[in-house]
């Protein structure tokens, strides 16, 4: 079973940057599409970015132009660079396959301060 370990969250100022990492057990090459999801307080979990094996990223309108997703096959890790962070980006961020599998990691908390 694939295991996912997210890290890199923390406190970031509005307009600041953060890089999230997702360590994937096993070979990342066997997973066609990986994604970053987030759940903000009182909201449903949403998919904000996904990346195919080719490296092409697709983004939700909420993060397009500010977030960049990438995958490193050597490290079996998926990253998400968050730039120009906004208050509405505050959430717990998770990585998972797309479509998601039942297993979820613990997530990593992103807190946005003014």
Image (cartoon, rainbow, N blue to C red):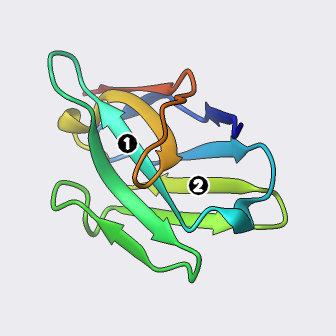
Residue at the spot 28% in from the left edge and 69% down from the top edge: 65
**Residue 84 in view, yes or no:** no
Return the residue at label 1.
Answer: 37
User: Where 36 sits versus 14, above or below?
Assistant: below
User: Where 13 sits versus 60, above or below?
Assistant: above
Left or right, residue 82 beside residue 97 = left
Q: CA distance from mark 1 to mark 2?
A: 12 Å
Q: Earlier in the sequence, mark 1 or mark 2?
A: 1
User: Where 79 sits versus 95, above or below?
Assistant: below
Left or right, residue 20 beside residue 87 = right
Q: Which mark is residue 79?
A: 2
**Would you call the spot at circle 1 few (<14 residues within 10 Å), some (14-19), or many (20 or more)?**
many
Which is nearer the eye, 103 or 93?
103
Which is nearer the eye, 78 or 31?
31
| Spot occupied by residue 96 in the image (x, y as percentages of width and height) | 50, 44
**Would you call the spot at circle 2 few (<14 residues within 10 Å), some (14-19), or many (20 or more)?**
many
Find residue 75 and report its image quarter: bottom right
Between marks 1 and 2 in the image, the one whose residue lies nearer the viewer: 1
Which is nearer the eye, 32 or 59?
32
Check the picture and name the quadrant holding the C terminus.
Answer: top left
Residue at the spot 22% in from the left edge and 60% down from the top edge: 60
| Spot occupied by residue 97 in the image (x, y as percentages of width and height) | 50, 51
| Spot occupied by residue 58 in the image (x, y as percentages of width and height) | 34, 71
User: Where 64 sits versus 101, above or below?
Assistant: below
Circle 1: element type: strand
């Amino acid at each position: 079973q694939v295991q996912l370990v997210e890290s890199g969250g923390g406190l970031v100022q509005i307009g600041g940057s953060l890089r999230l990492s997702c360590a994937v057990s096993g070979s990342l090459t066997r997973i066609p599409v990986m994604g970053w999801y987030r759940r903000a307080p009182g909201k449903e979990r949403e998919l904000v970015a996904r990346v195919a094996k080719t490296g092409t990223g697709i983004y939700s309108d909420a993060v397009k132009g500010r977030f960049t997703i990438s995958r490193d096959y050597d490290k079996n890790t998926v990253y998400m660079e968050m730039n120009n962070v906004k208050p509405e980006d505050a959430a717990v961020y998770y990585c998972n396959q797309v479509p998601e599998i039942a297993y979820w990691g613990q997530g990593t908390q992103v807190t946005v301060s003014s």
